[in-house]
Amino acid sequence: MDWESAARGLAAETVIRRESRWYQALATTPRHLFVPRWWTRTTSTDGEDLWELRGGGDTDTWLRDTYADTTLVTRVGTHHADHAQRGQTLPRGRDRRSTSSSTLPALLVMMYRAAFVTDASRLLVTTGSGYGTALACVRLGAERVTSVDVDPYLVKAARERLAAAGHHPRVEVCDLTGPLPEGAYDRIVSTVSVPTVPASWLTALAPGGRLVTALADTGLVVVADKTPEGGAVGHVAPEAAGFMNARHGEDYDDTFPENPPVWQSAQHAEGESITTGLYPLMYVPDTWDVRSTLAVLVPGIDHRRHTADDGIRTVYMLHADGSWARATAAGRRDLPTVHQGGPRRLWDELDRIRTWLVIDGDLPVRGATVTITPDGAATLSRRGWSATIA
């Protein structure tokens, strides 16, 4: 199996050889060792949405897929691809969210570059498949790398696979949002999203150290340097990125129920407010800056959609506080009829953000300044606007 040629091809596709210090890491790291099998989204012949097991064979297709610049999902719910049977499928649903993956290599490099990793950096990273940890070991030397994951199996598998690749970094079982392994780190790079920056990161960062992470349920990547006061100051990176949210156990404990009472209201109830939307129908998860702004201002919205046989589209927004919105439109350019109920008007919040975008041409989350207090509360600000995530 000529994986070396495939790895060099991935490196050439991802970075410029003469300019990037990450080329050698990408070109010499056996990604297939860390991701022998993975789950991919598919649809059955009868239209059922499924997760299908891929990989696990010495074939050209397997090699091509493994060394593609793409994310490979290695765990769905509590089902790790390592433990699945060849040809196995899982139904996709709200209780079958992806819970671990091998991040696409270009995004890993983007996060490491944002961290401004130097030859002397003591680096803490998240484990997942272990592939990103291996890249860091090639770049820095394993003695400078600490890798953490909440999943004991992932830690065990990563240790073994890293050792097989010739690397022996410190790899520990750890809830990323709690206390970190003892030590001082010059860089913390998280390829899982957190609701806000854990205070333990600021404690573990060395003076002047830098953290890079995504904020949960947004496409926002925060880059911030530790201040003498124990907080951090930085900015939202220009590149958008989506990562899985940090979990604290076997599976997520914040999955919105499939059929909560508010879902029944959203589907069938007359709204306490019935209006015509200001703009054509939008499904918020398909956006970046609108989704991110809404998630900062009104966190916790569950978005759903449905297209009827006659082509009429309906978008739903649900919140655990009982707020809901249902917006329906026949054509792509038609203004929707909007029903809303509960303590907040969720669609009005969305229309307010879209008006902001129309008037200003962008939204202030893009390139916002980020100020983080020692307890982890993060304030985003730009052009007179600010919002705090605590």
Image (cartoon, rainbow, N blue to C red):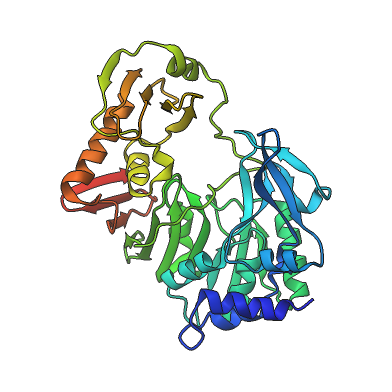
Name the spot of residue 101 as percent of width and height, x first: 63, 55
Q: Nearer the viewer, residue 189 or 36?
A: 36
Residue 256 horizontal side relative to residue 329, left or right: right
Q: Nearer the viewer, residue 7 or 372?
A: 7
Q: Residue furthest bottom?
A: 18
Name the spot of residue 29 as percent of width and height, x first: 67, 76
Residue 197 horizontal side relative to residue 65, left or right: left
Whether residue 143 is visible: no
Residue at the spot x=42%, y=69% of the render?
Answer: 114
* Quadrant for the C terminus in the image: top left
Residue at the spot x=36%, y=10% of the render?
Answer: 270
Q: Nearer the viewer, residue 168 or 116?
A: 116
Q: Residue furthest front?
A: 310
Quarter holding residue 387: top left
Above or below — where is 212 with respect to 12? above
Above or below — where is 363 with respect to 3? above
* Quadrant for the N terminus in the image: bottom right
Quarter holding residue 61: bottom right
Above or below — where is 15 with respect to 235? below
Name the spot of residue 85 as percent of width and height, x first: 84, 48
Residue at the spot x=30%, y=24% of the render?
Answer: 345
